[in-house]
Image: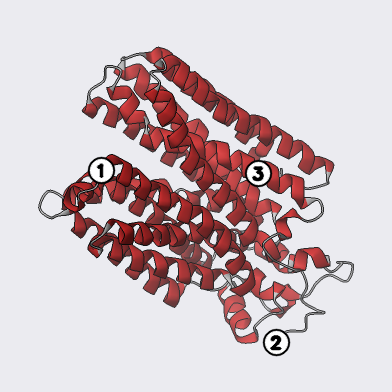
Amino acid sequence: MLDTATVTSGSAFQERLDEGRLRAVQIRVFVLCMLVTMLDGIDNQSIGVVAPLMSKDLGLDKTALGSIFSVTQIGATVGALLFGVVGDRFGRKTAIMICVSVMTVFTLLTAVVPTFELLMISRFFAGLGLAGVFSSALAITSEFAPGRLRGTMVSIVYAGYPAGAALGGIMAAAILTSHDWRTVLYIAALMGAITLILVVGWLPESIRYLISKGGRSANLDRLLGQLDLDRSALAEPKNEAAAPTSERAGGFWSVFRNDLAPLTVLLCIINLFISATTKIMVVWFPTILTEHGLTVSQAALAQAAFNIGCLAIMMIAGWLVDRFGSLRIVAPALALGGVCVAALGVAGSSLPMVMIAAALIGVFVGTGAAGAQAMATRLFPVSSRSTGVGWCTSSGRFGQMLSPMLIGIVLAGGTNIAYVFTGLAFAPWLAAAFAVAFVVVARRKGRKGF
């Protein structure tokens, strides 16, 4: 073990990491973490595609099917919080391995359980593992990234979710041409098992996590060698104060202590409104379009435009935040996203107009979503970073669980489509307002990087 009096917050290590070029071990971490986040998208899209076939085979009505979707989101909400704490206390890699294992086992069980009750249990635990990976995957990504690329790499890893969703949809469509719905879930579980093997064998633990826990000599020496650094990178400058005790002690409520409390609340609210918007665009958007004049194939094209816009911008959103700051990127993007959502209400049944608006919603709201993750990894200290990102992810999942139900109630009342989209536009507008408030509060508290 290293002397904890010598190794404190790891800021000297971060300075050396920032100065160096990108190494093979860092690229390996980023690729593996993106594969992990892709699993969530693959599962969500796959289960959405096979749901009608599964319900017919198991004799489930629409209410039962809705319950299955809801219980998955409940599991995701709990998992994001639970495994955020696990990642801070027992290591990022440990949390990721547990989450991928849980997801793999219960995705497989989803394909074989014979009753509705067991299906509900399997989907709850699948959601638990799927969302749980995000907090530790984003935390370890930020801790291996040089400061100049931190937001960029976090947003690329976060883009694994929409990339996985796109892959899951294509994969499910191809498999269902010659196999039954269970095969889609078998393949998804197999992909989880392969990813788990890669994580166990190739994903290192975060050096900054190891430093915060006092250091493990063998692991640190190996990782320092791969980063072309030596032990001098771990020594704190003489004028560097030790990290405050409140930042060293992780825990479920650690992100609500001292000056972190208002910033954590604001970031959770931002994630809730962003995720509420994206979930409606995935779940209800095609249905709304088909009920107002577009064909199913046209609605599918419009949703594809949204997904493509979202995925494309997420790959560079973090770089934009790194380059220009949160206030100049996240808040304006979300505000413009709200304008485009409202524009859907006046686009009518014009496919070109609908596709343009949908693509722009993907671009602007996707920028806000990836930018919010970059903000989270900058805000929280190493000792509670996974917990903090977990709180943000959990808030987003709660928004994903709540918003489809609210829109369903509104649509059942026969509300005009223009009013529906105008009302939905307030979600990104409110997220933009809270993003501005977050930056103002952060700067007043002396927080840099926003």
> Does the rendering let one see residue 228?
no
Q: Which amino acid does label 3 sit on?
A: Leu
Mark 1 burial class by Cα count in 10 Å: few <14, some 14-19, many 20+: few
Asked if residue 161 is positioned above or below residue 428 in the image, the reply reads below
Estimate the spatial distance between the alpha carbons at disc 2 and disc 1, rounded to whole Å: 58 Å
Asked if residue 211 is positioned above or below residue 247 in the image, the reply reads below
Q: Which mark lies nearer to you, 3 or 2?
A: 3
Q: Which of 382 and 388 is in front in this view?
A: 388
Q: Tag on residue 61? A: 1
Does residue 94 appear left or right of residue 209 in this picture? left
Q: Tag on residue 267? A: 3
Task: Check whether the beta carbons of the residues at disc 2 and disc 1 lie within 8 A of each other.
Answer: no
The image shows a total of numbered marks equal to 3
Extreme-left residue of the structure: 178
- Which quadrant is home to the C terminus? top right
Residue at 39% in and 32% down: 306
- Which quadrant is home to the N terminus? bottom right
Classify mark 2: helix, strand or loop: loop
Asked if residue 111 is positioned above or below residue 74 in the image, the reply reads below
Residue at 52% in and 73% down: 94
Q: What residue type is labelled 1?
A: Asp
Residue 344 x %, y %? 42, 19
Q: Which mark lies nearer to you, 2 or 1?
A: 1
Classify mark 3: helix, strand or loop: helix
Dot placed on the residue nearer the N-terminal end, 1 or 3: 1
Dot placed on the residue nearer the N-terminal end, 3 or 2: 2
